[in-house]
Amino acid sequence: MTLKTNPTNQEALPRPESTLPLQYIAQLDQLEALFDPLTEAVVWSRKLPHGIQNWLAAFHTSAFPEGSFVLKSVDAAAFIMDTFEATGVSRSPMLSWFSQDVAHLTHCVTDIMETPYVRLRLEAVSDDACRRFHIDNVKARLICTYRGPGTQIITTSDKPEDIETIPTGMPVLLKGKLWPEACDLSLKHRSPPIAGTGVCRLVLVLEGVHHEDIHPIYDQLYSSQRGVRHG
């Protein structure tokens, strides 16, 4: 099975129409659109390969690494390979594709945020965690739902029909409360309510961090040379 791991070669989708303050982009290197003062989020409009979707759908939640990890972008692919293999997942073209995809996203986050590290979380979500619409208390955060329904977004409206759902597989980079001039932000997001449905989402969360931002208790440090260790 041949999978394209270069984000510039992945299948781009037509840009959906939206009345929200966000931009849909065709290429990952266009994430800098977030610096537009009128833009509060940027969505990479792409489609995951069917083989990847089926591969992820077959996983039991125990296969997903738990915790908050801090690493350099150059170590992201090795981190995914190591942590998934540690849970019994064999090396395969699908795991290689997934590790490279996470690495590309990680590199973009550290590049655009100008940070030496990224905080990475892979979460298996089957409840209604983060079900309230909110703005994160960070400068910016990237969320990509690889399995299950995607992140929901809305502005000041409280009408259910105004809620938009980011399609599965599309990364969204959102401004947070610590973004310069963030007092004017209106775009909020939440995890879709799925408790009791039997659905399990796989969500990647990334944010750029400096060394002084590393939490000594909650963050686990990873490097390809030393593996995982606590902060």
Image (cartoon, rainbow, N blue to C red):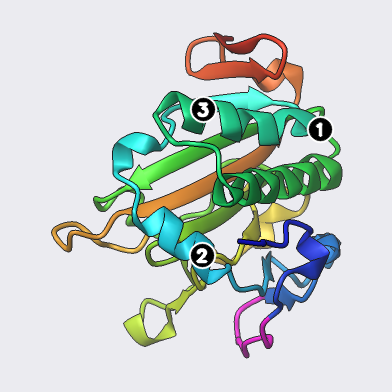
Disc 2 crowd, CA 10 A, few/some/many (<14, 14-19, 20+):
some
- Quickly name the residue at label 1: 115
Residue 118 rendering spot, x and y as whole percentages: 69, 33
Mark nearer the N terminus (2 vs 1): 2
In the rendered image, the vertical position of residue 58 relative to residue 211, given as above or below? below
| Residue at image mark 3 | 83
Identify residue type, mark 2.
Answer: Gly
Element marked by disc 1: loop
The amino acid pointed to by label 3 is Thr
Is residue 212 on the magenta stretch?
no
Q: Residue 174: tell me if it is visible.
A: yes
Real-space Cα separation, disc 3 to disc 2, in angstroms:
21 Å
Q: Which callout, 2 or 1, points to the residue nearer the camera?
A: 2
N-terminal-most mark, 1 or 3: 3
> Which quadrant does the C terminus fall into?
top right
Q: Does 73 appear above or below 42?
A: above
Mark on residue 51?
2
Magenta part of the chain: 13-21
Give the answer, above or below, for where 37 lies relative to 183: below
What residue sits 51% from the left and 70% below the top?
A: 50
Q: Give the Cα separation between the discs numbered 2 and 1.
A: 33 Å
Res. 6 image quadrant: bottom right
Tag 2 secondary structure: helix
